[in-house]
Image: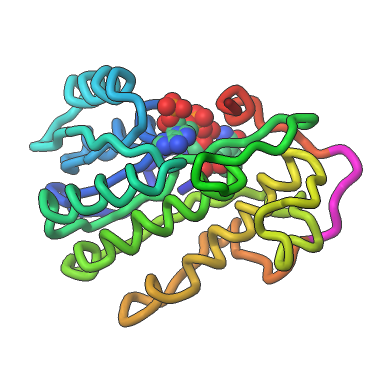
Amino acid sequence: MLGTARHVVFVPGHLVLCAGANTGIGFEAARELASKGARVVMAGRSPDKIKAAVEKVNAAAAGGGSAEELIVDLSDLKSVARAGDLAAKAFPTIDILVNNAGIMYTVGRDRAVTKEGFEEQLLTNVVGPALLTSKLLACVERADAGRIINVASSAHQFASPRFFTDLQSKDWKGGMAAYGNTKVSRPRAALSPPQHAGGVPPRPHPRHAPSPSPRRRPTSPRRSPTCSRRAP
Ligand SMILES: NC(=O)c1ccc[n+]([C@@H]2O[C@H](COP(=O)([O-])OP(=O)(O)OC[C@H]3O[C@@H](n4cnc5c(N)ncnc54)[C@H](OP(=O)(O)O)[C@@H]3O)[C@@H](O)[C@H]2O)c1
């Protein structure tokens, strides 16, 4: 999903679950979709932030559109499993699942691991969303034309050339390389089972068709101002 959600085709009344919806791209997508009649489940890790965002989206909703909250911390697999089970019961049919939440380390940041031992960006951007997706896959498959949107980034070009053998970025080449690794992994995960199994064949956005391997790294990576402030 690029820019706004104006070009996303959906039927009013469809249920959209968007992760990382309290701010940035996810919030704008939620607001736009609810204003066009979607029922949007806004997922985020901070109850206060999500509550405030849900209120704003509900205020802008129209045509039967609405917003509600789901609390999930994608950097904590127990939280993801809990939220996934809860959402699967509460929302048996999901028309669009948007794996949008993500963090990006700024250049120069040291490697950090979560309590479960994952490099933090890998868990938040790839492993957590993959677990959430597997918990909700049956709900998406129940929809007439269910879709899973994985928000990627052209930053995949900064990935370490050796990331296939070093997914955890133990050989730390800087935050941007590890972020790039996650943005290569995300479309690749979407092309793999279980998302591909029995579902609609994956269709990468034309501007973000996943490259099978990282391209040559430029010498001075561009920074994304809106993402970098999120690095914890
Ligand atoms: N902005 C760009 O230029 C750009 C370019 C290409 C791709 N992207 C991708 O687009 C997506 C959204 O980016 P954005 O610019 O909108 O970023 P953003 O404004 O920083 O928003 C990121 C969202 O992800 C949530 N999030 C972060 N860690 C989380 C966690 N552990 N559990 C649950 N939610 C978590 C954040 O919640 P909190 O507010 O609680 O932190 C926030 O809602 C990301 O996947 C990013 O990689 C962005």
Rendered image quadrant of residue 73: top left
**Could one spot residue 24 in this view of the protein?**
no
**Could one spot residue 58 in this view of the protein?**
yes
Q: Is residue 200 left or right of residue 219?
A: left
The relative height of residue 111 versus residue 144 in the rendered view (above or below) is above
The relative height of residue 191 versus residue 133 in the rendered view (above or below) is below
Q: Residue at x 71, y 38 (%)?
A: 111
Coloration mode: rainbow
The residue nearer to you, when weighing 131 against 37, is 131
The question of residue 200 being in magenta is answered with no
The residue nearer to you, when weighing 29 against 97, is 97
The question of residue 219 being in magenta is answered with yes
Across and down, in percent, residue 59 comes to 18, 20
The residue nearer to you, when weighing 23 against 172, is 172
Across and down, in percent, residue 191 comes to 49, 72
Q: Is residue 124 left or right of residue 56?
A: right
**Which span of residues is magenta-colored?**
215-220
Please identify the quadrant where the C terminus is shown: top right
